[in-house]
Image (spheres, rainbow, N blue to C red):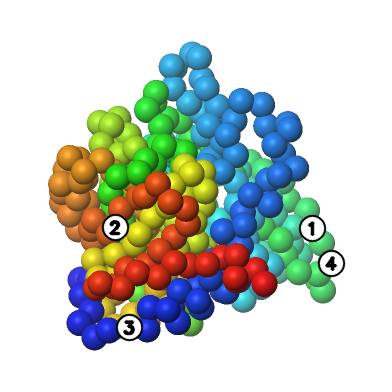
Amino acid sequence: MTQMPTAPIDLCELATRLARHASVLEKACIHNAYTQAESVCGSSRLGDDCAAIEDTASGGYLLFASEGMLESFVAEDPWFAGYSAVMVNLSDVAAMGGRPIAITNTLWASEGPACDAIWQGMRAASEAYGVPIVGGHTTRISTDAPAYLGASVLGRAGKHLLTSFDARPGDRLVIAIDLNGAYRRDKPFWNASTTTAPERLRRNLELLPQLAERQLCRAAKDISNGGVVGTLAMLCACSSVGVIVDLETLPRPTAANWMKWLISFPSYGYVLAVSEERVRLVLELFHERGIDAAECGIFTSGIGVSLRFGHLVESVDFGAGRK
């Protein structure tokens, strides 16, 4: 269950710390990562969770997602790095209203227990979510070199996409997170995947395509590294809107630290832009599946991300964070 805080928090300090946090700031400046591709991306828009390619045969879209795992993550937790390489891509496909078709991987590793653990993790995720690993590229390297891991997923969506570009001023911010989990070790990762039955994992991902097909949601994004605030910074930049996040209604595990939770990467978590008249229906869909979801604010005609607690509002000043 979520915790509804009663004690006040230092909102100014929290906003300042978030603006300076490396993972959040990286998301706020994500456009720097794809500037070089802007002249060669064709008709695709850069900034979504997946590349969306029009499929004239079906009248919908092919979706293509790709993720690389941090070298330190692969070294410290190789099984979970393998699992996550699959899981995060599947979440990205779902975030755009799509369904995954197949996975490929890219692995540079030496023979041995770490490589075996990476593969065991990828296999576990493939089997849990019911999506096959159909190929990829593997290079054997010397035993003293670090392993590198990436994965890609191909998916398919209908004619109604959920994008990062369609949030409008006045849309309500809905945040949905599966709180049926726990933090993994001391990392800001909320694991509601490896302990969840495969049937539930698959049903939960299916909610996003349903939202798209019923046109209940205008824009969506998977909550990634950088947490709620970093993800909203990316969404707002793509849609040229601002957002005010109401912390008092934000789904949150009982007793979770505010700073840690706002930068956390939940294994199942989405920020959604929903018109006011559709909020109730969207919330009901998530609640029926046992997923915590709430109306957590509003998109505005301004810019950037602001936090609200009670009557207080503080902006997260990423410009100051870059100094």
Q: Which mark is residue 297?
A: 2
Which one is in front, 30 or 83?
A: 30
Q: Give SS at disc 2.
A: strand
Kindly tell me whether residue 191 is visible in this rendering: no
Mark 1 and mark 4: span between their CA atoms?
A: 7 Å
Res 232 quadrant in image: bottom left
Return the disc, 4 or 2, that comes first in the chain's sequence.
4
Task: Determine crowd level at label 2: few under 14, some 14-19, many 20+ residues with C-alpha closer than 10 A.
Answer: many
Q: Which residue corresponds to mark 4?
A: 142
Looking at the image, which is closer to me, 184 or 120? 184
- Amino acid carrying mark 3 in the image: Ile
Disc 2/disc 1 C-alpha distance (Å): 49 Å
The numbered dot on residue 104 is none
Q: Left of 32 or right of it: where is 185?
A: left
Task: Give 197 or 281, whichever is nearer the viewer.
Answer: 281
Residue 182, x across and y down, in percent: 35, 74
Q: Which mark is residue 9?
A: 3
